[in-house]
């Protein structure tokens, strides 16, 4: 069945550095965040494949283009967060700061605007590329899917935290 | 099929691709029409809403309020599996709001905007586990517990996590939590491939 092959391909594409690991890492073996991110992306892709009803013909291009969308969005969010934190530190009275003078603040605000514009353009371009391989219904489902997936990812994170906490406290783990 | 429209069919209706028999049902069913109208309204609203970033001052006040809450209450953490399952959705949504708070209120090492992900991964603030970070841990607990107090449907509608919030939150996991997450994800992937 193509679906199974596709799922394996996803795992290989997104989780290649983790392929050698048969089991989840031990607590002391903290993975680089990027590796966990790849695993997360693989999960998203597999869900998307199923929920959108991606055909065998669509699949190869869909994988590449969804990955491009995820990367574009993540690049922007990470860069924007870093910039906002610079502004927060540089203009916070409580932090003993006000380290940024007006010129520096203006320069960062300009960068923020430029980043927002560029990020929006990148994401739009990635969506356009994805839409080219999807039919109308799949495009709509992709938008809905993305909303649901954000909630699902936060839920998985919460579950992981609770399970880790329960494990540390020596009680039964949270339900899967 | 004579039942109400499924969620997929409601989306089909918005697309104008609903089959004739189901469209006929929709025409005669007030409940389904209301559902589709709500879905359309939600989609339209989601497209229009642009949530501005609060000022840094807001986060300072927010952090102070969280600390007061934590100091003033003994948080009941134990929760049955049923309760967890019942409120998982609202917990997730509220957690998302908390993630944004944690992300913004923390003080990582300075990073360059230009280097993006590479700089993030190279930064000690992101590559080292946040072990012993008590304020974060307490704030997480408050967020998770508050999740149980919010109506699930309201949370779903109003507290959809900001795009990218979960990705950013990955950085805040300590090694135990990360191992649990990897375990969960691997289990999900195996279930699909198996």
Image: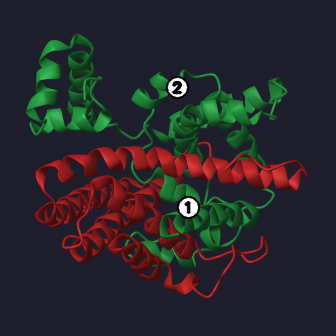
Chain colours: A red, B green
Query: Would residue A11 be found to the left or right of residue B176 on screen?
Result: left
Q: Quadrant of the N terminus of chain A?
A: bottom left
Quadrant of the rendered structure where residue B17 is?
top left
Q: Which residue is mark 2?
A: B152
Q: Residues within 10 Å of mark 1 (few under 14, many from 20)?
A: some
Q: Residues within 10 Å of mark 2 (few under 14, many from 20)?
A: some
**Any part of residue B96 in sight:** yes
Q: Residue at x 52, y 45 (%)?
A: B100
Q: Residue at x 12, y 51 (%)?
A: A136
User: x and y percent of residue B160 in the render?
Assistant: 42, 37
Q: The residue tagged with tag 1: helix, strand or loop?
A: helix
**On the same chain: label 1 and label 2?**
yes
Residue B43 falls left or right of residue B14: right
Circle 2: element type? helix
Q: What percent of the width, then of the height, locates residue B87? A: 61, 31
Per the model, the C-alpha gap separating discs 1 and 2 is 24 Å
Q: Is residue A117 left or right of residue B115?
A: left
Chain ID of residue with mark 2: B
Please report, as a chain letter, where disc 1 is located: B
Q: Nearer the viewer, residue A73 or B90?
A: B90
Q: Is the C-beta separation of discs 1 and 2 under 8 Å?
A: no
**Residue B177, image x, y percentages:** 71, 60
Q: Position of residue B38 (x, y in %)?
A: 26, 22
Q: Residue at x 36, y 44 (%)?
A: A147
Question: Tag 2 or tag 1, which sits nearer the N-term?
Answer: 2
Q: Which residue is mark 1?
A: B188
Q: Quadrant of residue B24?
A: top left
Mark nearer the viewer, 1 or 2: 1
């Amino acid at each position: 069945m193509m679906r199974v092959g596709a799922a394996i391909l996803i795992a290989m594409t997104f989780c290649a550095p983790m392929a050698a690991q048969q089991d989840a890492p031990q607590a002391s073996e903290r993975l680089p965040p990027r590796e966990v991110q790849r695993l997360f992306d693989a999960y998203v892709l597999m869900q998307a494949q199923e929920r959108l009803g991606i055909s065998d013909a669509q699949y190869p291009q869909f994988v590449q283009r969804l990955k491009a969308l995820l990367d574009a969005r993540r690049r922007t969010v990470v860069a924007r967060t870093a910039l906002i934190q610079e502004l927060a530190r540089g203009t916070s009275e409580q932090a003993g700061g006000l380290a940024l003078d007006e010129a520096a603040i203006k320069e960062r605000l300009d960068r923020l605007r430029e980043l927002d514009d560029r990020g929006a353009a990148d994401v739009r371009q990635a969506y356009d590329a994805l839409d080219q391989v999807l039919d109308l219904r799949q495009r709509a489902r992709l938008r809905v899917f993305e909303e649901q997936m954000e909630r699902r990812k936060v839920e998985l994170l919460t579950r992981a935290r609770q399970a880790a906490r329960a494990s540390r406290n020596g009680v039964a783990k949270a339900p899967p | 099929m004579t039942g109400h429209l499924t969620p997929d069919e409601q989306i089909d209706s918005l697309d104008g691709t609903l089959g004739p028999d189901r469209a006929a049902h929709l025409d005669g069913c007030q409940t389904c029409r209301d559902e589709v109208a709500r879905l359309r309204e939600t989609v339209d609203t989601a497209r229009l809403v642009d949530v501005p970033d609060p000022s840094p001052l807001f986060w300072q006040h927010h952090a102070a309020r969280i600390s007061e809450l934590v100091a003033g209450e003994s948080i009941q953490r134990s929760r049955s599996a049923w309760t967890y399952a019942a409120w998982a959705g609202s917990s997730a949504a509220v957690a998302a709001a908390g993630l944004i708070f944690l992300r913004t209120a923390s003080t990582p090492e300075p990073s360059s905007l230009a280097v993006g992900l590479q700089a993030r991964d190279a930064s000690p603030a992101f590559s080292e586990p946040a072990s012993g970070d008590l304020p974060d841990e307490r704030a997480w607990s408050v967020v998770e517990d508050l999740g149980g107090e919010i109506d699930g449907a309201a949370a779903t509608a109003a507290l959809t996590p900001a795009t990218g919030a979960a990705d950013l939150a990955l950085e805040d996991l300590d090694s135990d939590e990360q191992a649990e997450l990897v375990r969960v994800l691997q289990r999900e992937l195996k279930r699909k491939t198996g």
